[in-house]
Image: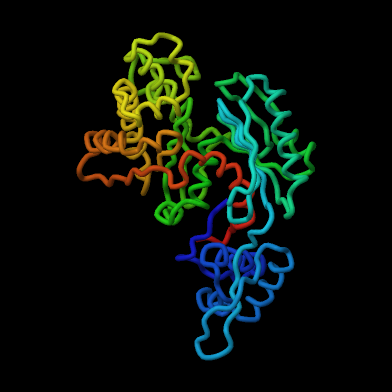
Amino acid sequence: MRRIDLKRIQTAHFSTMRAINRQIVLNYVRDRGPISRAEIARQTALQRSTISEIVDSLLEEGLIEEVGAGRSTGGRCPTLLALRTSGAAAIGIDIAPTRTTVAASDLAGCVLEQEEFETDHDFEKTITRAINAACRLLEKSQGKIEGIGVSLPGLVDPSTGRLLYIPYFKWHDLDVGPRIAAATGLEVTIDNDANAAALAELWFGHSEVSEARDFIMVFIAEGVGTGIVFDRQIYRGEGGAAGEFGHMIIGERAPVPCSCGSYDCWEAFASGRAAVARYSKLAGVGEDARQMSFAQLIDRALAGEESARSALRETARYLGIGISNLIIGFSPEIVVVGGAITRAWDLVSDLFSEAVKRSIRRDLPTARIMRSTIGDRASLMGALSLVLANKFASAAAS
């Protein structure tokens, strides 16, 4: 799914012209609305008759709506168009290691309602609760639900909707997409949490990220995931396994094992679990402290507890090492850091920059490192984006 770059768009003039032009008009309303038919015609160089025909179709489908009159430039006041925001358009299911969130959003990605529960290590219990929550949201919806997106913390095959492996739960080879589709009657799209978070930044992030052509999302939770955006599309690689940089070796004798069992991986040094283990050792509170969540550790660091701050900053130092490796290898415009750690950005961001300065040669391009513009809801927004992006994506992007 490629997000249209409105700065580089070229109107199509082939057999797919009408379908592509329809996506162009829809994206102009999404990105620049409220906007008039005349303004869309001026900016796209499409014929006004073509614009009117497409707009009438989008109005009939309920994807856009007329929202009032614009300012007159000498004649009749133009009618302004915007995305329809009344009623739900998508359901997202974000299955994270600790919590599962099921939410409904409108076409603009605004969450209208959600349910949340503790993720059970038993797949059947978790998937059943998620399906029941989705069905309740579907029944309560006053809009037209386009589909369901599912974000998962591990390897998946988006083409089949199959979960391949989630190390944290030891879940193997499970039909997630088909199972939810059969229960709800809706089309279901799945992806891993880092790819979903990257897609959310591409579609709902601030313009400095959403308008970038290439960027990498580094998603920090119990593990470390990366979502790669090349040419405004998620890069998945062979078998959907691209972006598994949490398993690159950056040291020895990490404070916790990686999900693969190794003590050498980036994830073992830079994950939320690693930060909690460091805090446990520094605070001298033993194994009981390892039961706390990464979010709770961040709360303590923000409250000024020195052991929590030290554990968090040491974890950030290792995050910076991995990020510098990604910049050297891919030379992206931006590296976006997502997950709960974004709440403590002022405590850790300088360590990312220091690691990059030490490792990247002065004659090579670097990249901006910034926190997620969506915050710690990136994977949930990613699940919703898996549905909504299908409505706005177009092969016409250049």
From this view, report whether residue 397 is shown above or below residue 216: below
Q: Nearer the viewer, residue 93 or 164?
A: 93
> Residue 49, located in which quarter of the rendered image?
bottom right
Seen as rendered, the residue at the extreme front is 303
From this view, report whether residue 280 is shown above or below residue 366: above
Q: Nearer the viewer, residue 186 or 133?
A: 133
Task: Report the side of 324 relative to 86 (left or right).
Answer: left
User: Coloring scheme of the render?
Assistant: rainbow
Q: Residue at x 48, y 38 (%)?
A: 376
Q: Residue at x 54, y 35 (%)?
A: 193
Task: Report the side of 174 relative to 200 (left or right).
Answer: right
- Residue 326 is situated, as x and y percent measured from the top left of the image, at 36, 36
Q: Nearer the viewer, residue 244 or 275?
A: 275
- Residue 230 is situated, as x and y percent measured from the top left of the image, at 46, 48
- Residue 225 is situated, as x and y percent measured from the top left of the image, at 47, 32
Seen as rendered, the residue at the extreme bottom is 74
- Residue 196 is situated, as x and y percent measured from the top left of the image, at 55, 41
Q: Residue at x 58, y 29 (%)?
A: 99
Q: Residue at x 38, y 18 (%)?
A: 264
Question: How many labels sit on residues?
Answer: 0
